[in-house]
Image (tube, rainbow, N blue to C red):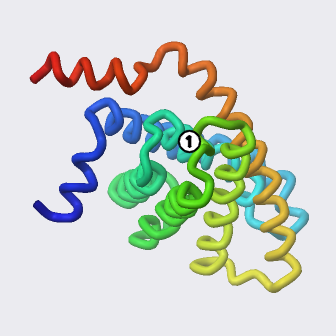
Amino acid sequence: MSLWQRFINRFSMFDLVMIAMTAALGVATKPIIVPLAHLITGPLFIPGGALAGGFYMMWLVIGAAITGKRGTATLVGLVQGFMVLVTGFYGTHGVLSILTYSFPGLAVDLGLLFYRSYVKSVSGMFIAGILANVAGTISTNWVFFRLPFIPLMLSLAVASFSGGLGGILAYKIVQQLSRFLPTEGEESQEMDMEE
């Protein structure tokens, strides 16, 4: 069995559905939020994604919180990158979409190595939101914008603020959803019944 197959086998069907749904919601909300953010960021000469990112990157955090498994945020980002690449739905990054969309998910998952309980706490999801949006801002700047130092620092400060707010919003959403989602025990019982 390959490394990829072993990695994917860690996720239940429920996990994979949640990954697909959060990826789709992230891509769908981006074209709504970014134009509104451009009204604020345009005069400051910083990319609109730095401000808007916290509110579409939060879906990476939500996906990771729902499944509670390492690698979820990276998978959500990869699915988003492939969706954008194949459909051309939002953005003209071409094959670089896979990089710019998956890098924020990778940052969230790397954060899990140091702060395992982030999926359970508002402070952890706040940090995860910051990691996702700052990583997204860095990757798009590196690939496309190449901003000078001061606008880049301003972009990263705005990205941190927006990402933190997105993380708090993600926590509130997961709190509401948790009443309807199966617990790990219920999920494993369902899998046993299917077998």
Quadrant location of residue 7?
Answer: bottom left
Is residue 18 toward the left or the right of residue 125 in the image?
left
Q: Can the viewer see residue 185 in this picture?
A: yes
User: x and y percent of residue 158 in the render?
Assistant: 83, 59
Quadrant location of residue 47?
Answer: bottom right
Is residue 70 toward the left or the right of residue 167 in the image?
left
- Quick one: SS at disc 1? helix
- The quarter of the picture where the N terminus appears is bottom left
Is residue 169 toward the left or the right of residue 181 in the image?
right
Counting other residues with Cα less than 10 Å from the Cα at mark 1, is it few (<14), some (14-19), or many (20 or more)?
A: many
Residue under the image location 50 percent in, 43 percent down? 64
- Residue designated by label 1: 59
User: x and y percent of residue 103 in the render?
Assistant: 52, 66
Q: Is residue 149 above or below residue 6?
A: below
User: x and y percent of residue 189 in the render?
Assistant: 25, 19
Q: How many marks?
A: 1
Q: Can the viewer see residue 84 in this picture?
A: no
Q: Nearer the viewer, residue 114 or 148?
A: 114
User: x and y percent of residue 125 in the render?
Assistant: 67, 43
Residue under the image location 20 percent in, 24 percent down? 191
- The quarter of the picture where the C terminus appears is top left
Residue under the image location 45 percent in, 20 percent down? 181
Q: Nearer the viewer, residue 168 or 123?
A: 123
Q: Is residue 156 above or below residue 130?
A: below
Residue under the image location 47 percent in, 62 percent down? 102
The amino acid on which the numbered mark 1 sits, given as a three-letter code, is Trp
Quadrant location of residue 67?
Answer: top left
Q: Is residue 132 above or below residue 45?
A: above
